[in-house]
Image (cartoon, rainbow, N blue to C red):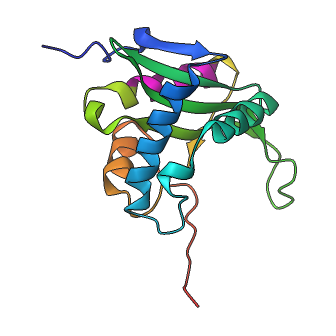
Amino acid sequence: MPSPFLSSACIAVSRVPAMAALVAVLRDLHRHENQIYDRSRPADTMGGWYIDYLRQETAKTQGRILVAEGPDGIVGYASFHAVVTTEDDKDEIPHSYSYVGDLGVLASCRSMGIGGALLDACEALAREAGQHWLRLSVLAGNDRARAFYQRHGLKEHLITLEKPL
């Protein structure tokens, strides 16, 4: 049976998503990231304060939080920034782009097309905002997410290297 998430029809632009359900997805994302990155905050410390932070930050860039809803409630979310500028980057020609800050799907709902539907919705909003580029960041060690993003047409743009001291 095909997943109902294969189109962005079930993606909602939510100004005030259900906080508890959104926090559950956020914590699930952090549990996954904690396995890859030892400086990611522990999942149980993530809460409503971070959702409030996302709301404030996305509002600064004409963005919003998108949620994917299933029969039992919220199963995924993306924080979308519609207009990010490079005006402070003195070594670049000034331009703007859209940015996906977070994209998380409950572990029990992954590989059902939910992440793709969220990403497609972000891309559609970026186009509506007149942007020519959509960017996001991903942990270098998150091979599954990197492959997912590459399948969706994103390519490496800037690579940050780090050396432990």
Q: Residue at x 55, y 86 (%)?
A: 164
Q: Position of residue 100 (x, y in %)?
A: 58, 37
Assess whether residue 126 is covered by the magenta stretch: yes
Q: Position of residue 84 (x, y in %)?
A: 75, 38
Work out whether residue 94 or residue 138 is closer to the camera in this orientation and state it.
138
The reply, left or right, for residue 145 in relation to residue 59 is left
Up the image or down, 27 lies above or below 88; here it is: above
Q: Which quarter shows the C terminus?
A: bottom right
Work out whether residue 46 or residue 78 is closer to the camera in this orientation and state it.
46
Residue at the limit of the structure toward the left, as seen here = 1
Work out whether residue 154 or residue 99 is closer to the camera in this orientation and state it.
99
Residue at the limit of the structure toward the top, as seen here = 9
Up the image or down, 30 lies above or below 72; here it is: below
Q: Which quarter shows the N terminus?
A: top left
Work out whether residue 83 or residue 132 is closer to the camera in this orientation and state it.
83
Residue at the limit of the structure toward the bottom, as seen here = 165
On the image, which quarter does residue 110 sit in?
A: top left
What secondary structure is the stretch in magenta mostly built from? Answer: helix
Q: Which residues are magenta?
A: 117-127
Q: Position of residue 150 (x, y in %)?
A: 38, 45
